[in-house]
Structure formats: structure tokens, C-alpha cells
Amino acid sequence: MAGMVGAMIVLVGCVIAFVVFRETTRDVPELEPEAIDWTTAVVSIQSQGHEVAHPAELQDGWIATTIEFLPTEPVTFGLNLLTDEGRFVGLRQEDQRLEDLLETFVDDEAVEGDAVQIEGDLGGEWQSFEDEGGDTALVLDRKDHYLMVFGSADEDVLVDFASTLTLADLQE
């Protein structure tokens, strides 16, 4: 019995030594998000006669990471971005119910806040929503669809981004 206990202690010690050795000598790659060329996609969408809200340009250091487009009527369009500080900002143009959009992209228990006045081409009074985790959404009701700017970035960053949105033709 004593021999089995001793062998078990040696075996556990070997496993611990192996795990410690592996963790100290392993290179963990740093994954950087890959930027996509969102402007070419928007120009292509617009050339097909679809109207999508998009930023006039991105702020320095911001990158687009994914884009989604469905040629429904009205169109479904999504653009995901990372700020220069690595915070997430999303843009969504869709004709779903507002509750469904909030549940999908923010939280099923998002709480409505004060209205926010946005300047710019798509300016006006936008509804604001927040969740317990710190995500914020700004929503503009465009009658046949909703336009939503959302993410983990601070509300003032989302407001600034929303003020850059336009329907104008994007020139590459």
C-alpha cells in the first residue's frame, strides 16, 4: 500500500512538473483582429441600387472587422468595428421589431434611457438603451426599418459615430 501511495505521489509530481514546464516555454500567439475593406462592400451594395447607412469615414485607428448584407426590402446591413482602444461598435440597419434587435445585439433586458440628440445626415432624436453589462444602443426609427448603433464603447463614442452616418454614395 505504501508503495502505491509513493508511486501516486511521484506520478502527480511528474504531471505538475510537465504542466509548469509547458506553460513557461509555450509561445502564446497574440491574435490581432483582421481589418476588412468595408468601403468596397458599401460601394458595391450602393451600385446595386440599395440604400445603406454607413459612416462617411472611420476615425483614425478604427478598423472594420465584419460586414453583413442581405438584399431584402428594406435591406439588412451590419458593420462591426473596433475603436482605437479595442472597444466594440456595431451598426445595424434592419426591419425586425425593436425588441428583437435589442435582444439579439444588446440584451433581452435592455433598459430604455433618455433620448439622445444626434447631429449629422441621419441626425435627430435617437432612443438610448443600456444593459447591466455596460453595453449601450442608440436606435433611430426610420419608419420601414431601424438603424441601431451599439456596443461596449462609451455612449459619447457611439454618439460621435452615429453623427458620421450617411446615406450618401461612398466614393472609394
Image (cartoon, rainbow, N blue to C red):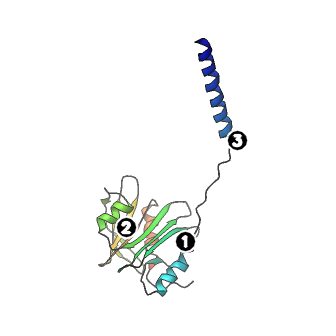
The quadrant where residue 20 appears = top right
Q: Residue at x 54, y 60 (%)?
A: 86
The amino acid type of the residue labelled 1 equals Gln
The residue at the far right in this view is 25
Up-down: is 133 above or below 67?
A: above
- Please tell me how crowded label 1 is: few (under 14), some (14-19), or many (20+) other residues with Cα within 10 Å: few
- Residue at left offset 41%, top offset 58%: 135
Name the kind of residue labelled 2 in the image: Leu
Position in image of residue 77 (x %, y %): 42, 74
Determine the residue positioned at 49% across, 62% down: 88
Question: Closest to the observer: 4 or 156?
Answer: 4
Residue 138 marker:
2
Q: Which residue is the site of mark 3?
A: 25
Q: Residue 59 carries which label?
A: 1
2 or 3: mark nearer the eye: 3
Rounded to the nearest whole Å, what is the CA distance between mark 3 and mark 1?
39 Å
Determine the image quadrant of residue 13.
top right
